Amino acid sequence: MRYHSTNQPSLQVSLKEAILRSLPADNGLYMPNEIKPLGDDFWDEWRDLSLEEMGFRVASAFFGEDVPEEELRSIVNGTLGFDVPLIQLAPADFLLELFHGPTLAFKDFGARFMARLMAYLTREDQRELTVLVATSGDTGGAVASAFHHVPHTRVVILFPKGKVSPLQEKQLTALGGNITALEIDGTFDDCQRMVKSAFLDRALSEQLNLTSANSINLARLVPQSFYYFHSSRILPVGVEPVFVVPSGNFGNLTAGLLATKLGLRVKKFIAATNRNDVVPQYLATGQYQPRPSVATISNAMDVGAPSNFARMLALFGDDAKAMSAMMSGYAFDDDQTRAAIREVQSLYQYQIDPHAAVAWLAAKKWRAANPGNATIVLGTAHPAKFLEVMESELGRNCVDIPERLSCLANQPSHAIPMSSQELPFHEWLKQFSC
Ligand SMILES: *Cc1c(COP(=O)(O)O)cnc(C)c1O
């Protein structure tokens, strides 16, 4: 299959280039040239397939021409391998727990698939690959865990000093080996700027064989569409779910749109955001106005210029009306989010993390205006990752911390402190590659 840039359909590349380059030179986003709906052979049996088999069929629709069946099966099986339970809070109110992977966030799906697909695509290259990633929290941990011990691959993670939670920081800094964490004296935006500057330095990028693990990478999106199929089929036959997606860069929601292109029946997508509400505003007014992000307690959604927006628009043929017909947006502030955490606990004895809490509020609002619809909230992170917020709403020691996370607390960690200037960072990278 060939891939093209959203900015320039004539700019065509192979799968390997689309994945390893991540971003086209014209600053667009890569899209597959065609997305064929799955055939009757899939729909006749999709409700009975194992999660692994279903994931394989979905992944084949995108990568089947380029990756041999056995390899693709092994990539999918290696990605999955943890539970994805659908919890019923109330008759029409469902929550899909996507946080049972190694780093307790849904980003494990994308990162684990990408690590395996990249290893396959570079299997005959004689060169070491350097994965560069900026993180505001969850992405770095998922990428570090997914690439740990992958041969011929090093990972360099930039995180803003003092701005990720202590447990998130441990996930970045405790692994060691081929994972190197840089503690940047600056903001997440600084980290992103530094990463971008390294890619723009052609000589450096070439010398290090740089690749990116950010959420615009198609290898991260495709595995995120698996769970839209998986959860839909758990509902009774004939019920079309409304998916409520806590969103930041909109990779997760875009993966849901890809699932509908393969033929999955979805009633509606709800874009749920915190005060960084650029997309809900767009859906309401037709005006797209990206702006600097503001900090909230659902910090993985603090995005002022969602990087997948152009791809979502492309999936609707650049038709704003078509997008608004399929998507609605709701935004909530921190006080409302905190109240929702308490309300879900008192109604259902369920601990909902701040990101899913935003989506739960959106689901409630949607159902009030559209009675009779079943909503599925995507539960994107385990509440233990946001202990401070949870404890301040529900009381001390209220959250059980899974062992995967608690055992990290005592491990030695290592991060290299660095200023937010670009040149010293480039110098460091050059040394690092020797
Ligand atoms: C990354 C993240 C999100 C936002 O996902 P996008 O694909 O960027 O929209 C939501 N919740 C959590 C917990 C996350 O880590």
Image (spheres, rainbow, N blue to C red):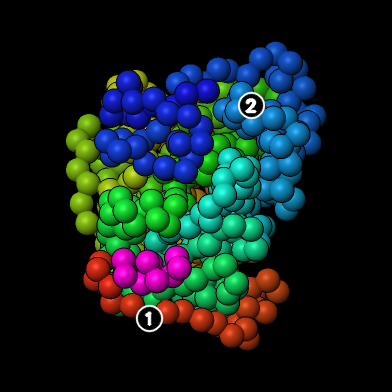
Q: Amino acid at mark 2?
A: Gly
Region in magenta:
426-434
Sequence order check, earlier mark of 1 and 2: 2
Q: Position of residue 318 (x, y in %)?
A: 30, 23
Q: Position of residue 352 (x, y in %)?
A: 56, 61
Q: Is residue 180 above or below residue 256?
A: below
Q: Quadrant of the C terminus?
A: bottom left
Q: Is residue 379 left or right of residue 81?
A: left
Q: Which mark is residue 64?
A: 2
Q: Is residue 291 left or right of residue 140?
A: left
Q: Amino acid at mark 1?
A: Pro
Assess mark 1: CB under 8 A from ligand 1? no
- Based on the picture, tell me whether residue 429 belongs to the magenta stretch: yes
Q: Which mark is residue 417?
A: 1
Q: Residues within 10 Å of mark 2 (few under 14, many from 20)?
A: some
Q: Residues within 10 Å of mark 1 (few under 14, many from 20)?
A: some
Are dots 1 and 2 in contact, CB under 8 Å?
no
For the point 58% across and 40% down, which residue is it? 121
Alpha-carbon span between mark 1 and mark 2: 43 Å
For the point 62% across and 37% down, which residue is it? 226
Q: Is residue 7 above or below residue 39?
A: below
So how many labels did they put on this image? Answer: 2
For the point 38% across and 51% down, which residue is it? 206
Q: Is residue 221 above or below residue 133?
A: above
Q: Position of residue 382 (x, y in %)?
A: 59, 63
